[in-house]
Amino acid sequence: YFFFQVLWTGPFIVIFWQTYNKYSNCPEYFYLHNMLGNSLSWSRGAAAVLWFSCSLMLLPMCRNLLAFVRNTLCKSSRRLRRLLDKHIWFHKACAITTIIAAVVHTVAHLINGKRFSENYSTDHPPLNFAKNRDQDPLEFVMLSVAGFTGMGMMLVLLIMIAASTPIVRNRSYEVFWFTHHAFIAFYLMLAVHGLGGVIKHQTNLAAHTPGCKVPLNDSMDTPFNMTSLPLCREAEFAPDQPQVYHKSNTQVYQKPYHTVYCKCYHTGIPQSWKLLILPLSIYLIDRLIRVVRGYQEVTVIKVVNHPCGVIELHMKKSGFYAEPGQFVYVRCHSVARFEWHPFTLTKCPSSKDDSFSIHIKRTGDWTKSLSDQKPLLAALDDSGSLVAAPSVRSAVLSVDGPYGSPCMDVEEYRVSMCIATGIGVTPFAALITRIRSQIIHAQRPPRPHRLYFVWICREVGALQWFADLIHETSRQLWELNRPDFLTCLFYITSKGQKEKICINHTQSSWFDARLTHGRPDWFQIFRRVSQENPKTCVGVFYCGARGPSSMLRRCCQRMYKNGASFVFNKEVSA
């Protein structure tokens, strides 16, 4: 991730430094910087970073845009596809950058408010944000447009941060989903935040350089109509700490009544909102496509109940095409009208069969409510198979997709390792299904040339729904004299799991030879793969719990003596 961190932080550092330098050294902000000091530069630099990160934050969530880029621009480049597969990482990086910039911007502006009050200028009344000297900063900051919207955006960010933690997302996905849509209020407040008129700049620098003072006498109605200016001189820039620019720094004509500065100030028209036009337009178009596609008819043709709370749904949808490794979003109207949940395809449409399937594990409120739906339960017989397909119609489910994932590149490597925990096996189930189909219809082993399949489950029963498929595929490979194509390793982590997996002796013996009770020794597995495939680039694909991910990444980064290299790919969805 070091490359991505450098790639990400570099542009933001440049943006911050350029903006910071502008408000520290540009003449038009000379008097304002004199009043506020470096807190002005910090607030504006953080604001520039915030605007840029907010303009990018929505793009990684545009599913159809990512699918289009993956299928066109990145089709011939595996490196670009891997970069595109980091879209969740980029979205989180945008969010973290936005939070940091928002905190810095808020703190700097609170300091600005204090200095507006303490350094109230009678010589430059237009620059003042406070009404008088020593006014309570919270009073005029919180009651302003900038202060009110700023605090509102900070509140929205805090709510979204709290709801995005793994414990909240795993236990109540609905809370995460609904609070994340508070981004609408965030962007609305962001659009009007700059209308507060806090920051002003000098607009008549050509006629009046910083440090210039002139008297207002009887022949000068206003200091802006003068054609000649006496004793104008350019002053030095303000120091780091704020101080009033004293009269001793320049020569002034003294009159018996008063003296004014011949400066003209303007808040300027906010321009940063233009950064949001393109990403917001792309996001709205993307959401519109998803809404239209979500209303297309879907028919559930088969429902199967598996052990360990897994439900298998077979569906049909007109014009639906997908490849192994892709996933879809599913909505159940009667459970939650606005919630879409991602599920990897375990079977893709083919020329022989245009149906597709997903496997759903009962883990949260939504999946439990879905599995308890009467239209699904009423159509099941004792074996769990669907009896009356017409009773389960599109009124139950909507499907959006498919969308790409890293697991689509399994066949792009000469040797691939597919590693899964629990229900994370679903993307590889579709791959095994296609391999079996190619074996049956083409009578030849497909790509990749060698496949290692590692599955870690808590209970033996979790393997059962996949047992027939994986055993039949292995048997057919043996008949083609390619027993080395598929290597399977199964691990059961719970103690006391002694029951048999399959009903017949052949399958039971096959699984027993490949089944280990306990957790895998990853370094030993990787050493074995490197020894069997020297000087080969091996693609490692993982889908499942967070725990093994960091260990697998370290194993892939380790250098092996025989020249084998490993490229780590982690399944993500959003």
Image: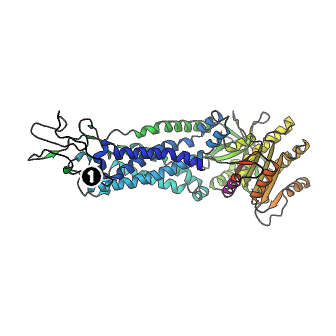
Across and down, in percent, residue 326 comes to 69, 42
Give above or below for 445 relative to 1. above
Residue 381 can be seen, yes or no: no
**Which stretch is magenta?**
550-555
- Image location (x, y in percent) of residue 522: 75, 57
- Asked if the stretch drawn in magenta spans residue 493, the answer is no
Q: In which image quadrant can residue 412 be found? A: top right
Q: Amino acid at mark 1?
A: Ala
Above or below, comparing residue 50 to residue 520 in the picture? above
The picture places residue 213, in percent across and down from the top left corner, at 19, 43
- Graded by Cα atoms within 10 Å as few (under 14), some (14 to 19) or many (20 or more), the crowding at tag 1 reads many
Residue 289 in view of the camera? yes
Q: Nearer the viewer, residue 203 or 510?
A: 203
Point out the residue furthest to the bottom here: 496
* Residue that appears at 67% across and 58% down: 547
* Coloring basis for residues: rainbow
- Is 554 within the magenta? yes
Above or below residue 90? Residue 111 is below
Residue 7 is situated, as x and y percent measured from the top left of the image, at: 55, 45
Most prominent secondary structure in the magenta stretch?
helix
In front of the other: 182 or 375: 182
| Residue at 62% over, 42% down | 83
In the displayed structure image, the side of residue 250 where residue 62 appears, left or right: right
| Left or right placement of residue 517 versus residue 333 in this view | right
The secondary element bearing badge 1 is classed as loop
The residue closer to the viewer here, 132 or 368, is: 132
The answer to which quarter of the image holds residue 368 is: bottom right
Residue indicated by mark 1: 130
| Residue 511, image quadrant | bottom right
| Closer to us: 500 or 243 | 243
